[in-house]
Every structure is written in structure tokens, then in C-alpha cells.
Image: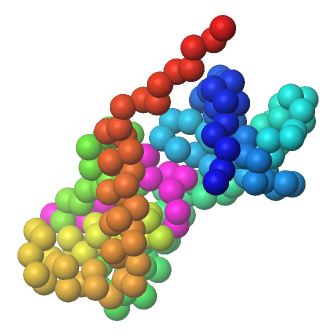
Amino acid sequence: MSQQPDAAARAPRASAAGAVEVRRSTRRRKSVSAYREGGRTIVLIPARMSEAEERRWVGVMLDKLAAQESKRVLGDAELTERAERLSAQFFDGRARPASVRWVTNQNTRWGSCTPAEGSIRLSHRLQGMPEYVVDYVLLHELAHLLVPGHGPDFWRLLEAYPRTERARGYLEGVVAADQLPPPPVADEE
């Protein structure tokens, strides 16, 4: 049975990257890991670490996450190239968008397509998500260039992408997490 960390060990800290929550574990011996969860960063460390080691490792892990995320963010030109590759791979090149770009005004949908113009827009909220999720949303919008609406023909097109269900599950999880209430704040004594 794992030991529950005390409130001080779980208390969120503020950083330039948002709230940081450090979780100490008696099972963890050497490894340190970190991940994003909602608007905060969770850093997992061994319970035996000193506060100085904790501060050092939090900094290291925040830098590591930032480096990983910066590699994943594609510019509009790379996004267009990616859409062309995906169209060639899954739709025999039939979906030919006139433009593909990131937008910051889509807060309730992941992407949109205007077939008459051939334009595809992806929400900036996808930036930093796993590549297979971005690929799924791109394919979803590319499919709209071939089949308007979400009828059986549309979904048949997306069956070609092997990670459709996984990506949809990921996005559903993000939406569900956004709707959770914020975690309780530990009282400081």
C-alpha cells in the first residue's frame, strides 16, 4: 500500500509555466518524472529528496517539458505540409486544402473546414498535444473536403487512420478534464 503524501508535499507552487504540484512517493527510489495536467505541471519525485534537490529537479523537469513541447509546435507551413502528406497517405491525395493554419479563436472546437474555400483551421489548443491527435484532427478536417457532414461516408474515410479511436478518446479526456473542478488548495499553517 502506498503512503499518502502530506499536504505540504502536494501543495501547488507557482512558476512561469503555471502551477507546479510536486508529489513525493516512498516507492520511487531514483527516478523523477513530470507531465502536464490541465493548466498545471505534476512533478513526481522520491520522498527522500531534500527541498534543495526538489527545487533543482522541478527546474530541470520544467525545462525538459518546455523543450519537448517546443519541438511539437508546428508552424502553418509545416502544418500544410503535414496535411498534404496525410492526404496522400490516407486519401490518395484527393483532399487538397487551399490553406491550413492555426487559429486562436476556436475555444469550443478542435478544428474547422470551409470546403467551398478549401480552408482548414486548427485550434491552437492542439499545439503540444501528441502528434497522432493533431494528425487525427487534420484528417478529420481533410475528410470534410471530400465529404461534407458527419454521415457514414465521412466516418468510413476516417477508418483508414488506425489511431482514430485513440485520438478521439484523448480529446474526450481533455474536454472532461477541463470540466473538473479545481483541486482543493491545502491550508498553510
Taking depth in this image into account, of 29 and 16 the one nearest to the observer is 29
Q: Vertical placement of 98 versus 110: above or below? A: below
Residue 165, magenta (yes or no) = no
Taking depth in this image into account, of 112 and 16 the one nearest to the observer is 16
Q: Position of residue 35 (x, y in %)?
A: 62, 49
Query: What residue is drawn where x is 89% and y is 33%?
Result: 50
- Tell me which segment is drawn in magenta: 116-131
Quadrant in the rendering for residue 177: top left
Left or right of 179: which side holds 66? right
Left or right of 29: which side holds 69? left
Left or right of 140: which side holds 125? right
Residue 122 appears in the rendering: no
Q: Where is residue 23 in the image (x, y as percent from the top left)?
A: 68, 39
Task: Assign the N terminus to one quadrant of the image.
Answer: bottom right
Query: What residue is drawn where x is 47% and y is 80%?
Result: 85
Query: What residue is drawn where x is 51% and y is 56%?
Result: 129
Quadrant in the rendering for residue 159: bottom left
Residue 186 appears in the rendering: yes
